[in-house]
Image: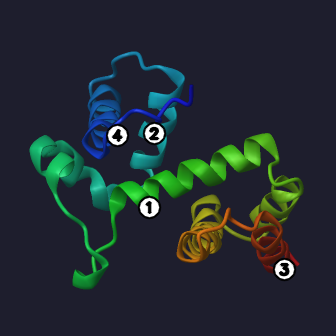
Amino acid sequence: MPLFQNQSRNDLRQMYVEAWRKYRERIPMEPLEAQIAQVIADHPEYHALLEATEVAVTREFTPDGGQTNPFLHMGLHLTVRDQVATDRPLGIRAAYESLLRRRDRHDVEHEIVEFLAEALWQAQRDGVPPNEQVYLRRVQKLAR
């Protein structure tokens, strides 16, 4: 069973809050918590939100209000890191490493996150699985 399959939005958000608390308090973490905490550490603009547990767990982030959902954003970072680690889609790691030779890691991830978010949005809009090859080609083109 997938790790997140039966968790609510609030449960998932609570995972971020708890990982960040453990990181700040130097409490041992599970590997996934450590990954989440590292992404949070890379995003100081979200620290205050994650330290206000009730607000973090229940707040609505709507595109209508011009708000970025920090949990979605950080989740996309985690996804990119997982894709690079597993090289899926095949070739993403090479493109990522090529980009790292010219740019900062966080900036590279942000560029890739934009392509990933668009691929996911298009898939959701069209009711189809994400097109990994179109996504990969966009990342590879950026890496050239």
Q: Quadrant of the N terminus?
A: top right
Q: Is residue 92 left or right of residue 10?
A: right
Q: Label 2 crowding class (10 Å Cα cut-off): few <14, some 14-19, many 20+?
A: many
CA distance separating discs 3 and 2: 28 Å
Classify 10 Å Cα crowding around label 4: few (below 14), some (14-19), many (20 and above).
some
Amino acid at the residue labelled 4: Leu
How far apart are the two marked residues, 2 and 4, measured between alpha carbons? Answer: 11 Å
Q: Secondary structure at mark 4?
A: helix
Q: Position of residue 18 (x, y in %)?
A: 28, 31
**SS at mark 3?**
helix
| Vertical order, 122 against 29 (above or below) | below
Q: In the picture shown, does residue 105 fall above or below 25?
A: below
Among the two numbered marks 2 and 4 on one chain, the one whose residue lies closer to the N terminus = 4
Question: Disc 1 vs disc 2: Cβ atoms closer than 8 Å?
Answer: no
- Mark 2 or mark 4, whichever is nearer to me: 4
Q: Which residue is mark 4?
A: 12
Residue type of the residue flagged with mark 1: His
Task: Name above or below for residue 140 compared with residue 90.
Answer: below
Q: Which mark is residue 141?
A: 3
**Furthest-top residue in view?**
28
Q: Residue type at mark 2: give it.
A: Ile
Q: Sequence-wise, which precedes: disc 3 or disc 1?
A: 1
The residue identified by callout 1 is: 73
The residues tagged by marks 1 and 2 sit, at their Cα atoms, a distance apart of 12 Å
3 vs 4, front mark: 4
Residue found at x 89% / y 57%: 91
Residue at horizontal 36 percent and vertical 35 percent from the top? 7
Give coordinates of residue 51: x percent, y percent. 18, 43
Which residue is denoted by mark 2 in the rendering? 36
